[in-house]
Image (tube, helix red, strand yellow):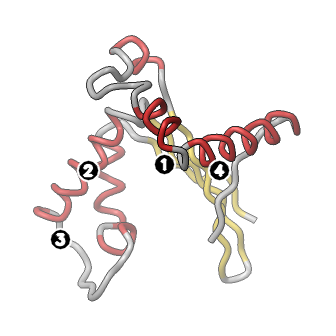
């Protein structure tokens, strides 16, 4: 299991790494930590116009049985609307859907799988298989 971030230019990648490093370092110093935490106060997030223009797209690569599958999940603003959909539809799936028996700690896919995907599709989040090899 690995995470990747795709960027088109090396300078963007280097700038991102430097920014994350600088933030992590600044967060260790109490005055800088206070300054950082005061930048955006609760309730001062993006307005409806900005959220309406926001979107997310996440690509996944899976390998097994000698095949590779590339998929994509996409939707609107991930910070508010789509996250709320994911939580609400997960709760509804756990409460009302006929789910497979599981035991112990399992992932969302194992616990709710196709039932949750169906609910999220109905709520406007897209799932697609981009390619198989």
Q: Secondary structure at mark 1?
A: strand
Residue 1 or 66: which is nearer the viewer?
Answer: 1
Tell me the tag on residue 98: 3
In the rendered image, residue 107, in percent from the top left (x then y), is placed at 38, 72
Q: Nearer the viewer, mark 4 or mark 2?
A: 2
Residue drawn where x is 45% and y is 36% of the image: 75
Tell me the tag on residue 109: none
Residue drawn where x is 51% and y is 47% of the image: 73
Mark 4 or mark 2: whose residue is earlier in sequence: 2
Find residue 41 and report its image quarter.
Answer: top left
Above or below residue 116? Residue 33 is: above
Residue hosting label 4: 130
Q: Say if mark 4 contacts mark 2, CB within 8 Å.
A: no
How many angstroms separate mark 3 from mark 4 (CA)? 28 Å
Residue hosting label 1: 127
Mark 1 or mark 3: whose residue is earlier in sequence: 3
Residue drawn where x is 50% and y is 40% of the image: 74
How many angstroms separate mark 1 from mark 2 (CA)? 17 Å
């Amino acid at each position: 299991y690995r995470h990747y971030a795709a960027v088109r230019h090396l300078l963007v990648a280097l700038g991102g790494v430097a920014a994350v490093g600088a933030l992590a370092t600044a967060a260790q110093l109490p005055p800088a930590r206070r300054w950082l935490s005061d930048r955006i106060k609760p309730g001062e997030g993006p307005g409806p116009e900005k959220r309406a223009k926001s979107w997310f797209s996440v690509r996944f690569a899976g390998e097994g049985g000698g095949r590779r599958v590339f998929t994509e999940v996409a939707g609107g603003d991930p910070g508010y609307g789509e996250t709320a959909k994911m939580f609400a539809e997960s709760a509804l799936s756990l409460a009302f859907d006929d789910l497979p028996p599981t035991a112990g700690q399992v992932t969302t896919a194992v616990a709710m799988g196709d039932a949750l995907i169906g609910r999220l599709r109905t709520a406007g989040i897209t799932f697609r298989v981009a390619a198989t090899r």
